[in-house]
Image (spheres, grey):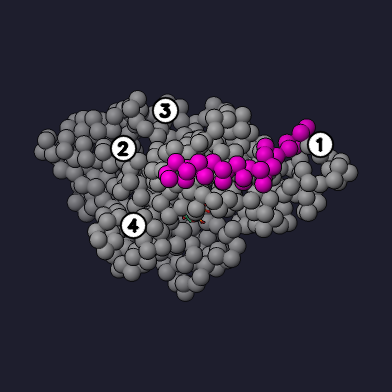
Amino acid sequence: MKHPIIIWLRQDQRLSDHPALAAAEASNREVIPCYVLDTRDTRPWRPGGASRWWLYHSLSEIGQRIREQGGDLLLKHGDPVSIITELALEVGASAVYWSRAVEPHCRRDETALASTLEAHGIGSEGFAGNLLFAPEMIQNRSGAPFRVFTPFWKHCLANGSKMRAPTGPVSPEFSTDLPDGDVLDDWGLLPTHSNWAAGLKETWQPGEAAGQALLHKFVEKAPRYNTHRNFPAEDATSRLSPYLHFGNISAAQAYAAFSASGREPDQGVAAFQREVGWREFSAHLLVHFPSLPEKPFRPEFADFPWRDAPQLLKAWQTGQTGFPIVDAGMRQLWHTGWMHNRVRMVAASVLVKHLLVHWHHGEAWFWDTLVDADLGNNAAGWQWVAGCGADAAPYFRIFNPILQGQKFDAQGGYVRQWVPELAKLPDRYLHAPWLAPVEVLTDAGIKLGDNYPKPLVEPDVGRKQALAALATLKSRAC
Ligand SMILES: Cc1cc2nc3c(=O)[nH]c(=O)nc-3n(C[C@H](O)[C@H](O)[C@H](O)COP(=O)(O)OP(=O)(O)OC[C@H]3O[C@@H](n4cnc5c(N)ncnc54)[C@H](O)[C@@H]3O)c2cc1C
């Protein structure tokens, strides 16, 4: 093995459209792919339970694909900067390549690794592989980052010629002579709560092959996307989010899949690509405003009078709020590790507005339970709903969980699937069971407060409380 190139794999767990691997292949050197499980105590935002489950299966899959090409995936744990440096010295690497990340701690690691390697005379390069554009390429006219999505996306579209175009699969010469590494099963990534993992397993097949297959299937469905995507009972969105987060597919592949299929772009495709644009925007925000996961983008919200209400939080987490659309979403999340976007918005809004619980708690729960948990998208999503984010919906716009249910789940297919105790309730009362006459409830087998909860707060009361809390911010500002 002569001066191989190390590929430091992170959220780029695929073998196609992988610029770092392609560059290693072009160098005609042997390649050692290595994944380091970051076990530092100081590591912020450790992967949650659902992410760890995905990671296990995704690493298994890519490891298998690399073995089919004659190599292997080296697994190590510890501080990625020291581990990769030691590895590079041990194997006499000529260079280390990686796909650039957007998370602040990962970016710090990249800088530290590059300078440590340089001190040892070892080359390094970070490649743009996970986004449509390198973050520093997108700036407004005054050279500052965008803070509002629409001009951001217009700017991206106007610079379409600079957008990354996906490249094909690579088959570099993987090294067969690897130093000792860890065994994936020893990392304890799989949840010990087997029921939970069963729901994830039933719903998902992590990895590049399944991600590509899902993307191809979605190309056929995309024309319906803009008209059907808000209805959670419909299978109208792509469900590609965990594949995009782990890099099982790239954003460039998702964006370009429609032109590759030879189909004329339509409104469905444009709407989907715009959502991929929201992912890009969240990444852009995280790069330029690294405190996004912790601090409100609008600083005045630091003084918001949040409640300390562990029981309300618990009821929300377990799908026992008494608002059927919210409970359906929270149970879908627990069972499958994913929740429909419309329902994420409503469930998040109820937590931060009707219940006045800090968005940090919702963000942390999603972080632990979503298979697509993503630092940028999650933080931007929560701040958007809480009204304190860049380009956020104003705080005083409060989703009404009854109306949202009636509008987006009018036939109740979603609520009936995830909240089966309400299945027999007529559509008219399905989204507000507490308004149903006692005999209707009895006929449907429901005893409120017994086999289904009363709402944690009357929606109008919750709304007024939220507005009163907002008013305290305004009065403090005066
Ligand atoms: C409170 C809250 C928290 C969220 N947390 C996450 C998270 O941790 N990880 C995550 O990937 N998404 C998050 N989202 C965004 C969105 O809900 C999911 O990306 C989407 O539901 C995933 O389903 P899909 O793949 O079928 O999306 P599609 O509708 O098919 O969209 C295609 C892709 O575009 C991206 N995308 C879509 N909507 C958004 C959006 N609003 N913001 C950013 N990117 C978007 C995703 O990568 C998605 O896979 C959050 C939204 C909210 C309101």
- The alpha-carbon separation of the residues under discs 4 and 1 comes to 51 Å
Q: Which residues are magenta?
A: 449-478
* Residue lying at 72% horizontally and 49% vertically, measured from the top left: 431
Q: Which residue is mark 2?
A: 105
222 to the left or right of 426:
left
Residue 261 visible within the image: yes
Q: Is mark 2 within 8 Å of ligand 1?
A: no
Q: Which mark is residue 447?
A: 1
Q: Which residue is mark 3?
A: 187
Indicate whether 364 appears above or below 249.
above
Mark positioned earlier in the residue sequence (4 or 3): 4
Q: Which mark is residue 146?
A: 4
Q: Is residue 450 magenta?
A: yes
Front label number (4 vs 1): 4
Front label number (4 vs 2): 4
Q: Is residue 83 magenta?
A: no
Q: Residue 73, position in %: x, y?
A: 34, 38
Q: Quadrant of the C terminus?
A: top left
* Residue lying at 19% horizontally and 40% vertically, measured from the top left: 114
Q: Is mark 3 within 8 Å of ligand 1?
A: no
Query: Which picture quadrant has residue 107?
Result: top left
Mark positioned earlier in the residue sequence (3 or 2): 2
Front label number (4 vs 3): 4
What type is the residue that disc 3 sits on? Answer: Trp
Instruction: Say which of 240 and 26 sits in front.
Output: 240
- The alpha-carbon separation of the residues under discs 4 and 2 comes to 22 Å
